[in-house]
Image (tube, helix red, strand yellow):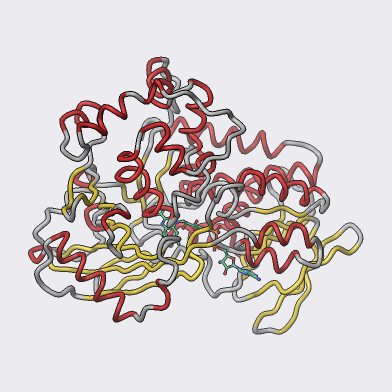
Amino acid sequence: MLSSGRRVVIVGGGISGLSAAFWLRQGGINVKVIERCARPGGVIRSELLQGYTIDHAANCLMNYLPEVSYLCETVGLSNHQVFRQDRAEKRYMVKQGRVVEVPTRVLDIVKSSYWSPLAKVRMLLEPLVPKASPATQESVANFIRRRFGREMYERGIEPFIAGTLAGDAERVCARSALPRFSELENQYGSIIKGALIKKFHGNQSTYPKHIFSFKAGMEALPAAIAGYLGESMQVDSEVQTIERQGQHWVLKITSADGIDTLKADAVIMATPATVTASLLQPLSALLASQLRSIVYAPMVVLTLGFNAADIDHPLDGIGCLIPAVERKQVLGTLWSSSLFAHRAPAAKVLLTCYMGGMLNQGILQHTDQELCSQVLQEIKHLLGAHKEPDFVRVIRHARGLPQYHLGHQQRLQRIATQLHLLPGLYLTGNYLDGVSVRDCISRGRKVALDVAEGLTGVNDLRHISESVVSSASRAGSTH
Ligand SMILES: Cc1cc2nc3c(=O)[nH]c(=O)nc-3n(C[C@H](O)[C@H](O)[C@H](O)COP(=O)(O)OP(=O)(O)OC[C@H]3O[C@@H](n4cnc5c(N)ncnc54)[C@H](O)[C@@H]3O)c2cc1C
C-alpha cells in the first residue's frame, strides 16, 4: 500500500466525491470527505413508502465498466444488487397518443409500425451522408437530422435527450451527449457503417453490460461507500471558504460544533458547478465564471403506486419516453416495479414519472396538487389506469441535471487551463463529462489517480488500481 502521509480533502459527499475518496483510500492515501447534509449521496436518495421502494434521482446504474463492479464488490454490495428483470427488456415510446413498442434490432425495425416507410429509407441512406468536419460544433438535433432525417430525430433521439438528460436537443452539444456516435462519424464517415465494422471485427467492449440497482434502492451505494470510508466521512459540515496558505490549502468548515479549519495537501471539489464557482471565486474569477455558465435543468420526479389490476397496460418493459411533438407534460415514465423485483408490494406496481427539463423550465412554479393532477391525467390516458393510485410522491430538483450545451468542450478546456494555475486543486462532478452514476464513479477514479500522482510524483496508485480493476473485469465477464 502507498501511504504518502499527506491529506486530501474532498468537498461534497455525492457519488462523485465518494468515489474519488474510495479510489484514494484504495491507494492508502489519507482522505477526508466533507458533506453539508446529514446523509451522504447528494441527489441519490431512496425511501421506503407504504411498502414501495422509491428513488428520488438515479433509479439504476447502466454499467459496462469493470471499475464500477469492483467498487460495488469492495464496499460489500455484491449480495445486495438487483438486476433488470427479463420482463423489462422492451422499450416503448408514445406515438399519436398511444404507447408503442420501439424496435431495437435491425430486422424488427424493418417490420415495425413505429417508423414510417420514409423514415426507414432515410435511415438506410445514412452511410451516404457526407461526414462533417471534426471542427464542426453541432447540436444533437442538427447532427441527427443531418445523418438520419427528421423522424429519427423527433421520435428517436429528442425524447431520449429530454427524458434521460432533461435536455433541449436543439442546444445540447452532439459530441458531449452522443460521443460514441460522433466518434463513429469521425472515424468511419457513417454511424451505421462504423457500428457494423466494429461488430464484424469484434472491436467492442468485452465487459458485459448490466442494468442494476440495490435491494434497498440506489442510496445503498453511497451509504456503503461512506461505511467503507468510516471516520473519513464527515457529514453535517459545510465548507465555507478555501484558501491557499504556502504549500497547503486551508478550508473553513461550519457544523453544529461551530467553525473549524482543515489543512490539506490537495483538495477535490465534488460540489455542483454553481457551488464550486462560489467557493473558488476568490481564487480564480475566470474559473468561477466558466463554472457558473453551466446551466442546470429543473426536474420533478413523481412516483406513483397503483394496484396492478387497475392498469390496463402490461408494463412489460423498462418504461416509455414521450417525444416533445406529442405535447405532453410528462417526459417519460420508468416502470420501476417491472425493471427490478421488490420495488412494490405484491399485486402493486410502481411508476416513476419525470417532468420539467430545459423544455419546461417553469415546472417548479406548479403546486404539488397541479403536478399530481397533470401526471395522473396523462398516465390514466396512456397506460389505461382506471382507479386512483395508493400514493403520489412529488420530488423537486431545482438544479436537476447539468446541461452540456454547444461550446461545452471548449468550456472544459478553459476550465482545465485555469485549474492548471491552481496546483493541488481538482474538480469532479456530473457537470464535466457524463451525468450518469457510472460516469461519476469512473471520473472519481481518474481524479484520484491524478491527485495521487500530483502528491507523490509516482503512479503507483495507477498500477494498484489497474490490477484490481482488471481482476474485477475477469469476474464480471463470468457474471
Ligand atoms: C431526477 C434524476 C434522475 C436521475 N436518474 C439517473 C439514473 O437512473 N441513472 C444514473 O446513472 N444517473 C441518474 N441521474 C444522475 C445522477 O444521479 C447524478 O448525476 C449524480 O448522482 C450526481 O452526483 P454528484 O456527486 O456529482 O453531485 P451531487 O449528488 O449533487 O453531490 C454534491 C454534494 O455536494 C454537497 N455540497 C454542496 N455544497 C457543499 C459545501 N459547501 N460543503 C460540503 N458539501 C457540499 C451536496 O450536499 C451534495 O451531497 C439522475 C439525476 C436526477 C436529478
Describe residue 46's horizontal placement relative to residue 254 as left or right: left
Describe residue 283's horizontal placement relative to residue 468 as left or right: right
> Residue 282, position in %: x, y?
80, 67
Looking at the image, which residue is at 32% across and 59% down?
A: 331
Looking at the image, which residue is at 45% across and 28% down?
A: 205
Looking at the image, which residue is at 36% across and 60% down?
A: 217
Which quadrant of the view contains residue 326? bottom left
> Residue 355, position in %: x, y?
35, 65
Describe residue 312's horizontal placement relative to residue 134 as left or right: left
> Residue 53, position in %: x, y?
30, 66
Q: Is residue 479 above or below residue 202?
A: below
Q: Residue furthest top?
A: 201
**In this view of the protein, can residue 33 be seen by the observer?**
yes
- Could you tell me which quadrant the C terminus lies in? top left
Which quadrant of the view contains residue 14? bottom right
Which quadrant of the view contains residue 115? top left
Q: Nearer the viewer, residue 435 or 472?
A: 435
Q: Is residue 460 above or below residue 246?
A: above
Q: Nearer the viewer, residue 224 or 65?
A: 65
Describe residue 28's horizontal placement relative to residue 73 as left or right: right
> Residue 66, position in %: x, y?
49, 37
Q: Is residue 268 above or below residue 279?
A: above
Q: Nearer the viewer, residue 190 or 237?
A: 190
- Could you tell me which quadrant the N terminus lies in? top right
Number of numbered discs overlaid on the protein picture: 0
**In this view of the protein, can residue 226 be seen by the observer?**
no
